[in-house]
Image (cartoon, rainbow, N blue to C red):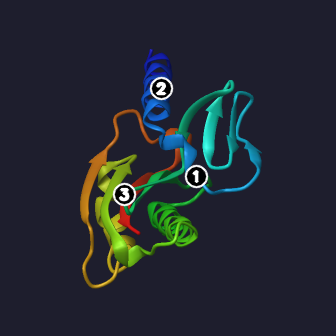
C-alpha cells in the first residue's frame, strides 16, 4: 500500500514537474542505472522511461536540490556528514555554495537521532545558517538512509 501510494505520488510529481519544465535544467552528464526500472540521465531520474524528478533544478536565480541520502552502513553522524558533503559538491557544481543556502529540509529515520544530526549539521552553512525544517519520517527514509536532506540556495 505504501509503495503503491509512493509510486502514484512520484508519477504525479513527475507530471507536474514536466509541465513546469523543471526537468530540463539538470547538468549532470551520462546515464546511471539505479535499479531494474530507475535510471538517471543528465540529472533526471526516470522510472520506466517516465521522468520522476530532477536532482538539480535552477529557476529565477535559485538552485533546488532534490533529497540526498546516505545509502551505506553507518550511524547518523556518518550519514549526516556524507549527505552534507554531497550537498556541498552538488551546490558547487550548480554554481553556488553552502553559505548561499536559504532553506534545508531534513528527514530523519528516527527522531532520537536529532541531537547527533545537529552536532554534524552545525556550522556547515557559514555565519548565517538557512531556515530549516526537520521531521521524522513515518516508515523511514527511502533506501535505508538514516537521514535525507534537500535544499534551496541562491545562485
Nearer-N-terminus badge (3/1): 1
State the SS at label 2: helix
Residue hosting label 2:
15
Report how far apart the C-alphas of labels 3 and 1 lie in the structure.
Answer: 15 Å
Point 30% across, 59% down: residue: 114
Q: Nearer the viewer, mark 2 or mark 3?
A: 3
Tag 2 and tag 3, C-beta contact below 8 Å: no
Quarter in which the N terminus is drawn: top left
Vertical placement of residue 106 versus 124, above or below: above
Which label belongs to residue 2?
none
Report how far apart the C-alphas of labels 1 and 2 lie in the structure.
Answer: 17 Å
Vertical placement of residue 132 versus 23, above or below: below
Tag 3 and tag 1, C-beta contact below 8 Å: no
The quarter of the displayed image where residue 149 is located: bottom left
The quarter of the displayed image where residue 118 is located: bottom left
Tell whether 97 sits left or right of 31. Answer: left
Point 46% across, 25% down: residue: 6
User: In the image, residue 136 lies at what x, y percent?
Assistant: 31, 45
User: In the image, residue 21 lies at what x, y percent?
Assistant: 48, 39
Nearer-N-terminus badge (2/3): 2
Which label belongs to residue 60?
3
Tally of numbered discs:
3
Tag 1 and tag 2, C-beta contact below 8 Å: no
Towards the viewer: 53 or 105:
53
Residue hosting label 1:
26
Quarter in which the C terminus is drawn: bottom left
Nearer-N-terminus badge (1/2): 2
Towards the viewer: 19 or 76:
19
Dot 3: within a 10 Å radius of its alpha carbon, few (fewer than 14), some, or many (20 or more) residues?
few
State the SS at label 3: loop
Tell whether 5 sits left or right of 37. Answer: left
Amino acid at each position: 500500500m505504501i509503495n503503491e501510494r509512493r509510486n502514484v505520488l512520484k508519477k504525479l510529481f513527475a507530471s507536474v514537474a514536466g509541465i513546469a519544465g523543471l526537468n530540463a535544467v539538470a547538468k549532470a552528464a551520462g546515464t546511471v542505472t539505479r535499479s531494474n526500472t530507475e535510471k538517471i540521465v543528465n540529472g533526471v531520474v526516470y522510472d520506466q522511461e517516465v521522468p520522476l524528478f530532477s536532482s538539480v533544478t535552477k529557476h529565477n536565480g535559485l538552485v533546488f536540490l532534490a533529497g540526498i541520502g546516505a545509502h551505506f552502513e553507518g550511524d547518523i553522524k556518518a550519514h549526516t556528514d556524507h549527505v552534507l558533503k554531497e550537498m556541498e559538491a552538488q551546490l558547487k557544481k550548480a554554481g553556488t555554495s553552502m553559505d548561499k543556502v536559504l532553506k534545508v529540509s531534513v528527514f530523519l529515520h528516527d527522531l532520537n537521532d536529532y541531537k547527533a544530526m545537529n552536532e554534524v549539521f552545525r556550522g556547515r552553512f557559514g555565519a548565517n545558517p538557512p531556515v530549516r525544517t526537520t521531521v521524522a519520517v513515518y516508515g523511514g527514509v527511502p533506501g535505508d538512509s538514516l537521514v535525507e536532506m534537500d535544499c534551496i540556495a541562491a545562485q
